Image: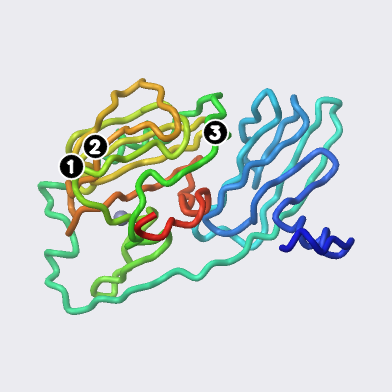
Amino acid sequence: MNGMHVSVWLLVLSLSATTAWAGLTIRGEPVQGGLLVAETTPGARVSVDGVEVRVSPQGAFLIGFGRDHEPTSRVEITYPDGSREQRQLSVARREYRIQRIDGLPQRKVRPRQADLERIRKEAAAIGRARHRDDPRADFLSGWQWPVTGRITGVYGSQRVLNGEPRRPHFGVDIAAPVGTPVRAPADGVVTFAHPDMFYSGATLVLDHGHRLSSSFLHLEKILVEEGQRVARGEVIARVGASGRVTGAHLDWRMNYHRQRVDPQGLVPPMPEPGR
Ligand SMILES: [Zn+2]
């Protein structure tokens, strides 16, 4: 939107990325996989799609949409004076890349029985870290790419192997040489650091508060410890090719409540190579 041609109509259009009601401001576009930062009256209580969400003392809260969120979302606010407001957001639909691969040997499709117990234990441990609910509103620190490079995998894409749909890919994959520094994309606290997981190799979880977290997979080395507080831009790890991968890259994923959200929605466009 060109700010030089200000007319009432253009002003209305330029507000489309910000939804404002009496006691509620929402920044960003509601879209599947999206995460929005909203603001309401301090002391208000908020539920989104029937689930109560944490509101910071300043009135900031998050709204997240999963990969396949239905076309509308319901936001209910109870103000400190007891009055209530209910609003509906339209959630834009996204198209995801689906890749079908047939004729694979069956043993490559399913993990071996002997590995299943390990996989289950690891999933439970990382799940506990991702479901933590902290009052810190570190997500307000602003966002940056943890690594820059060519994007080789995107949120929501899915493979169908021998006709069996696999779990969608929820991260953004960034190709980078082994050893490249990984920087904290926002402020946070390290809540999980594992040197060698079955699928994801050396894996790190950074908690940004209000049940929002980042996970970094396939690392070469983790440079921080559980419980450590880190600032946006601080080096936390090095890119690797650990776990089940075909090449060195960073896989950055984000969880909000029980949803997976798209990290790419939070950061500016990836800088061109050589800058
Ligand atoms: Zn990946």
N-term mark: 3 or 2: 2
Q: Quadrant of the N terminus?
A: bottom right
Q: Crowdedness of circle 1 by 10 Å Cα count: few (<14), some, many (20+)?
A: few
Alpha-carbon distance for marks 2 and 1? 6 Å
- Residue 265 in sight from this viewpoint: yes
**According to the image, label 3 marks what residue?**
141
Q: Is residue 139 above or below residue 245?
A: above
**According to the image, label 2 marks what residue?**
121
- Residue 116 in sight from this viewpoint: no
Q: Is residue 116 above or below residue 210?
A: below
Quarter of the image holding residue 17? bottom right
Q: Crowdedness of circle 2 by 10 Å Cα count: few (<14), some, many (20+)?
A: few
3 vs 2, front mark: 3
In the image, taking residue 51 as reference, residue 76 lies left or right, namely: right
Alpha-carbon distance for marks 3 and 2? 33 Å
**According to the image, label 1 marks what residue?**
117
Amino acid type, residue under disc 1 in the picture: Glu
Residue depicted at x 39% and y 65%: 157
Q: Is residue 222 above or below residue 25?
A: above
Q: x, y (%) of residue 233?
A: 41, 35
Residue closest to the eye, 77 or 186: 186
Residue depicted at x 28% and y 75%: 163
> Where in the image, quadrant-wise, is ligand 1 located?
bottom left
Residue closest to the eye, 72 or 141: 141
Q: x, y (%) of residue 218?
A: 23, 46
The reply to whether dot 2 and dot 1 touch (C-beta < 8 Å) is yes
